[in-house]
Image (tube, rainbow, N blue to C red):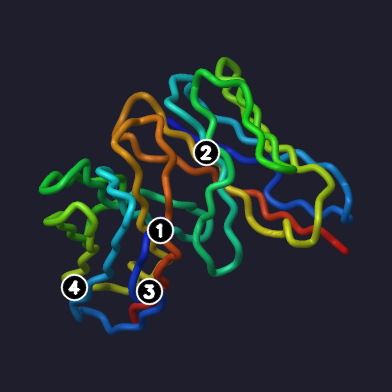
Amino acid sequence: KQEVTQIPAALSVPEGENLVLNCSFTDSAIYNLQWFRQDPGKGLTSLLLIQSSQREQTSGRLNASLDKSSGRSTLYIAASQPGDSATYLCAVRFLTGRRALTFGSGTRLQVQP
Amino acid sequence: EAQVTQNPRYLITVTGKKLTVTCSQNMNHEYMSWYRQDPGLGLRQIYYSMNVEVTDKGDVPEGYKVSRKEKRNFPLILESPSPNQTSLYFCASSFKGVGTEAFFGQGTRLTVV
């Protein structure tokens, strides 16, 4: 079964810290991987999309890496701010199946001022 | 502004009373889908559509219907809602190429009593 796992489930850090969120997936045959941010009671905001042929993508203070062969991705957030507090979701589009995005359960991040 | 719009944002209804949640996108995307998000279960795909008049089941289609009469709209229909359909629902869209970015609506919080 194709699964996506995110560790840790929750993370609390002081403002200014650099941090890494982890995502692992069970099948290396993927089209792409997408990181989202979800604020409480709100929709999903796309942060970064990494194609299977890419190793990393960057947007501002965010950097996402992809190691397809080991089934892992990381989201690096530099110089964290209280406004970064949210749940971060990793989603994988596997090669086999319905092209649906398979989501991890998310990492709930709290950045303390 | 490119967006996916869902309505209503919040809905409380009674068991058995038919309802429709609308979804509209203005990005000319071919692929649209519906997800539900439940605590501990994450986001799961309900139905998807590859293009006009082409729909298919996702992971959890029971109790739902969809239609795709126009490219921009993809309504979710609950013919006879039950309490286990209380959830947060998201509509998503993307171009049909498998490497493309998915965009999500703001979500519809449905409560069935």
Q: Quadrant of the C terminus of chain B?
A: bottom left
* In the rendered image, residues at marks 2 and 3 fall on the same chain: no
Q: Which residue is mark 1?
A: B3
As displayed, is residue A24 above or below residue B110?
A: above
In front of the other: B43 or B32: B32
Chain under disc 2: A
Q: Name the residue type under label 3.
A: Leu
Q: Which residue is mark 4?
A: B80
Query: Which quarter of the picture shows residue B83?
Result: bottom left
Mark number, residue B110: 3
* In the rendered image, residues at marks 1 and 2 fall on the same chain: no
* Crowding near the residue tagged with mark 1, few <14, some 14–19, many ≥20 C-alpha atoms within 10 Å: some
As displayed, is residue B22 above or below residue B14?
A: above
Q: Is residue A72 left or right of residue A113?
A: left
**Mark 3–mark 1 distance (CA, rounded to whole Å):** 21 Å
Q: Name the residue type under label 2.
A: Gln
- Position in image of residue B80 (x %, y %): 18, 73
**Mark 1–mark 4 distance (CA, rounded to whole Å):** 29 Å
Secondary structure, mark 4, is: loop
Q: Residue at x 36, y 83 (%)?
A: B12
Chain under disc 4: B
* In the rendered image, residues at marks 3 and 1 fall on the same chain: yes
Secondary structure, mark 3, is: strand
Chain under disc 3: B
Q: Residue at x 35, y 57 (%)?
A: B91
Q: Name the residue type under label 1.
A: Gln
In front of the other: A105 or A31: A31
* Crowding near the residue tagged with mark 4, few <14, some 14–19, many ≥20 C-alpha atoms within 10 Å: some
State which mark lies toward you, 1 or 2: 1
Mark number, residue A34: 2
